[in-house]
Amino acid sequence: MKKILYVGYRDNSHSSAGGYDSIIGNPETDCLMGENVPFGFIPVSKRGKILNVIFLGIISRFKRLRYTVVHYFYGDTLVVPFLRLNKHKTVATLHLNIEEERRCKSSFIKALRSLDGIVVLSTNQKRILKEKYNLDSVFIPHGFNRPKFKKVESGLNKSKINVCVLGQNYRDYDTMETIIKFCLEHRNDICFHMIGQPQRIKEQFYNYCNVVVYPRIPDDKYFSVVNDCDYSFLPLTFATANNALLEAGFLGTASILPQIPGVEDYGAPSPLNLYYSNMAEAKKLFVSLKKRNKSLDLIRFCEENFLWDNVYYKLNDYYKTLMDK
C-alpha cells in the first residue's frame, strides 16, 4: 500500500510559480490530476469543468483504497460524503469562503463532516468552520517558491510610482476605483498596472489615464512588471491564500492590504507591507507613497514562512496525526 495520493487539477489562471497544485511535489506521493481524466481539457473558468471534476471524483474513490491518505487539494467542489475507513484517511483543502452562496451547500457541509481531516488556508476559515458548523480543521498555509523568470523590459516609467493590481478573487473593485480616481486628483505620479483581470474589469478601467490594463502576458513579462513595481495593491474582501500577495512578497515588492481577519496569515507586518482599515486610511496611505526599493526582509519573511518544503513538512506531520487517531 502506498502512502499518499493527491487529487486535484492545475488552474492555468495562475502563474508558473502559483497554484496549489505544487502540493504534488511532496516527496514519496502519487497524484491523480484532472488533466489526465475525461474532460481534462476544459479550463477551470468554464462551466463544463464540472464534468471533469465529476470524473475525477469517481476515479479517485476507486483508487483511494490503495493509499493510506487521499488528499483532495481543491476540496471546495466536494458534495458526496465519504465512507470512513480505519486504514484510509480522506483529507481536503478548502480555499474559498465557506459562507458564500453556492449550489448544494448542505451536501457540501455533509461531505466535509465525512472527512477525516480538513486543511484550511487561513485562520479566519478555521474560525468560521468551528463557530458556524462545529467542524475542526487545521491551518496550514499555502506554499510558494521564489519565481524563476528571465528578466525582460517591463516598459514601466521608472520616474512614476508604479503599483501593480494582480488577480481577481475576492477583490473590492469599488475601493479600487475610488482609489484610482482619488490618485488622479491628488497623486498623478502614481500609475496602476492591472494584470489578470476579467474582461468586464478591463473595460471598466481601460480609459483611466493612470491605469495600464494588460492582456494575459507571458510569465517572464508578468514577473518583470511585478518586480519593477514599487507596490502591489490588494483591496481584498476576504482573506484566504493569495498567490498575488506571495508573488509580490517573494520578489520583495511591498503590498498594500486591508486590515481584515486572516490577512495577517500571509501579510508581513508593517512596514514591510502597508495596511489600511477604512477608506480614509487608504487615501492617506496613497498620498504618502514614495518610490520604494526591493525589501530583502520581505523576501526573507516569505521564504521562512511559505516555501513549499516547509509546507510539506507540516502536511506530513498532520497526516501522521490523523493516522494515529
Image (cartoon, rainbow, N blue to C red):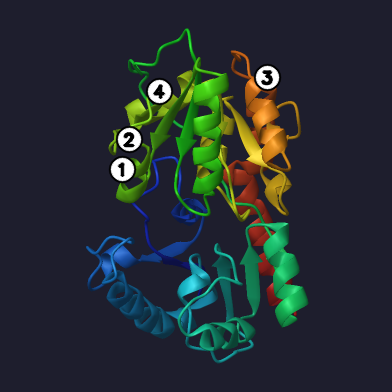
> Mark 1 = which residue?
203
> Mark 4 = which residue?
224
User: Residue 184, image x and y in percent?
Assistant: 49, 24
> Mark 2 = which residue?
206
Which residue does the image show at 50% across and 55% down from the upper left?
A: 23
Q: What's the CA distance linking mark 2 and mark 3? A: 25 Å
Q: Secondary structure at mark 1?
A: helix
Whether residue 210 is visible = yes
User: Residue 102, image x and y in percent?
Assistant: 49, 76
Kindly check if marks 1 and 2 are in contact, taking CB atoms under 8 A apart as contact: yes
Q: Secondary structure at mark 2?
A: loop
- Residue most toward the top? 159
Of tags 4 and 1, the one toward the viewer is 1
Kindly check if marks 3 and 1 are in contact, taking CB atoms under 8 A apart as contact: no
Q: Nearer the viewer, residue 203 or 135?
A: 203
User: Residue 192, image x and y in percent?
Assistant: 45, 27
